């Protein structure tokens, strides 16, 4: 396997810059996920690494060698596409071994590698079937098998689970994580699904408008987002972002907006003072809010707009002044729409951002 490096890479199509000044390193045997909304540049980045697109500037290195001028077929990478790209007239065995056959590998070696990949992916019983006889998950395993037989320096996966239903995606996420742990491959994985990025990655890079917003382990990025975009993108339900003005009241720092008054903890007050701005945005995740039907001095009074039962929890939408706050609750707490409710945030887990720039304010 190999280390992969992007050094100030940009990609332009005409006057549009879709990847801008990208610098990152994927460590040997690491699974790094490029995650972001459609149009953020993640698939274009993967295509440049694969040799399907040429960078407009900057360099891309695999195992210490700059590959900008190296053809795709000579980069020793294996790519798995969203569409699976299986040959319909070939059996599973033939699909998996086709790339090796094209490279002139002896038939005995091809058969051995195909059998090894099929055993690893638990599709040995499907080797004589054709793609039309397979489910979506089975076709995905065949596409992965074709990549595994190559024994490449790196695996590149572009939205490989997006064609599967929700239940199968969850199952395949776990299988992919186990698979790449066993093969110890260097993997660059592209997805718009934050759940895939959080569960699969050693590290993830959150992209927006062609730029990497933050790189880190899933929990690092989730617990300390660099800006409001990252905070909103990771987490379901989304983080609550409440903008307001800072005021001194009764010796305490308070966040004020129409119909909402929230005293800040000493930690948050110190962070806000250090930022030197009177306008801040408080970020609090739905799971870090407590809802009670009894009044609380440290809570925000609001009214239930709607409650969504999810089985293991409920998602409550609460109107507080002109703000709409989302909180998760235990399944046995199911207030009726219009009911008065008190919301208490866990201030130790709240985040502060500059309202104008969206950048995180660090303590």
Image (cartoon, rainbow, N blue to C red):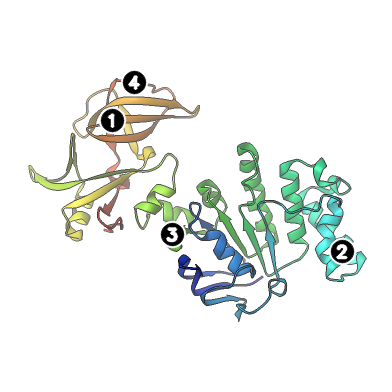
317 relative to 346, above or below: above
Q: Residues within 10 Å of mark 1 (few under 14, many from 20)?
A: many
Q: Is residue 347 left or right of residue 161?
A: left
Residue topped by disc 2: 110
Q: Is residue 79 left or right of residue 197?
A: right
N-terminal-most mark, 2 or 1: 2
Q: Is residue 83 left or right of residue 126?
A: left
Answer whether labels 2 and 4 touch (C-beta < 8 Å). no
Q: Position of residue 207 (x, y in %)?
A: 46, 59
Answer whether labels 4 and 1 touch (C-beta < 8 Å). no
Q: CA distance from mark 2 to mark 4?
A: 64 Å
Q: Is residue 33 visible?
A: no
Tag nearer the camera, 2 or 1: 1
Answer whether labels 3 and 2 touch (C-beta < 8 Å). no
Q: Which mark identifies residue 209?
A: 3
Q: Position of residue 141 (x, y in %)?
A: 74, 50
For numbered disc 3, what is the local secondary structure? Answer: loop
N-terminal-most mark, 2 or 4: 2
- Along the viewing direction, whichever of 355 and 83 lies nearer the viewer: 83
- Along the viewing direction, whichever of 105 and 86 lies nearer the viewer: 86
Q: Residue furthest left?
A: 250
Q: CA distance from mark 4 to mark 1?
A: 11 Å
191 relative to 32, above or below: above
Tag nearer the camera, 3 or 4: 3
Residue topped by disc 4: 337
Q: Quadrant of the C terminus?
A: bottom left
Q: CA distance from mark 3 to mark 4?
A: 38 Å
Residue topped by disc 1: 319
N-terminal-most mark, 3 or 2: 2
Q: Is residue 281 visible?
A: yes
Q: Position of residue 54 (x, y in %)?
A: 59, 72
N-terminal-most mark, 1 or 3: 3
């Amino acid at each position: 396997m190999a280390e992969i490096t992007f050094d100030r890479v940009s990609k332009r199509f005409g006057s549009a810059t879709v990847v801008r000044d990208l610098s990152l390193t994927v460590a040997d045997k690491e699974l790094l996920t490029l995650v972001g909304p459609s149009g953020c540049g993640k698939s274009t980045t993967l295509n440049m690494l694969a040799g399907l697109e040429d960078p407009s500037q900057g360099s891309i290195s695999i195992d210490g060698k700059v590959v900008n001028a190296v053809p795709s077929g000579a980069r020793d990478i294996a790519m798995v596409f969203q569409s699976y790209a299986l040959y319909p007239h070939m059996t599973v065995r033939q699909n998996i071994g086709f790339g090796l056959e094209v490279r002139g590998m002896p038939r005995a070696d091809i058969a051995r590698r195909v059998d090894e990949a099929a055993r690893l992916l638990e599709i040995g019983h499907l080797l004589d079937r054709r793609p039309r006889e397979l489910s979506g998950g089975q076709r995905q395993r065949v596409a992965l098998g074709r990549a595994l037989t190559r024994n490449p320096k790196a695996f590149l996966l572009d939205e490989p689970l997006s064609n599967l239903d929700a239940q199968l995606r969850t199952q395949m996420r776990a299988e992919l994580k186990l698979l790449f742990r066993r093969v110890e491959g260097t993997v660059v994985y592209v997805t718009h699904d934050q759940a895939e990025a959080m569960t699969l990655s050693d590290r993830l890079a959150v992209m927006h408008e062609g730029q990497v917003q933050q790189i880190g382990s899933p929990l690092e990025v989730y617990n300390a987002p660099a800006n409001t975009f990252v905070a909103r993108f990771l987490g379901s339900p989304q983080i609550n972002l409440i903008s307001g003005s800072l005021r001194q009241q009764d010796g305490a720092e308070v966040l004020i907006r129409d119909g909402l008054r929230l005293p800040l903890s000493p930690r948050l007050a110190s962070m806000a003072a250090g930022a030197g701005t009177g306008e801040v945005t408080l970020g609090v995740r739905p799971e870090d809010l407590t809802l009670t039907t009894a009044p609380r001095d440290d809570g925000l009074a609001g009214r239930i707009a709607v409650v969504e039962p999810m089985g293991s929890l409920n998602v409550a939408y609460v109107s507080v002044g002109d703000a709409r706050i989302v909180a998760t609750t235990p399944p046995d707490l199911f207030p009726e729409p219009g009911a008065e409710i008190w919301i208490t945030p866990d201030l130790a887990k709240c985040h502060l951002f500059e309202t104008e720039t969206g950048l995180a304010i660090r303590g």
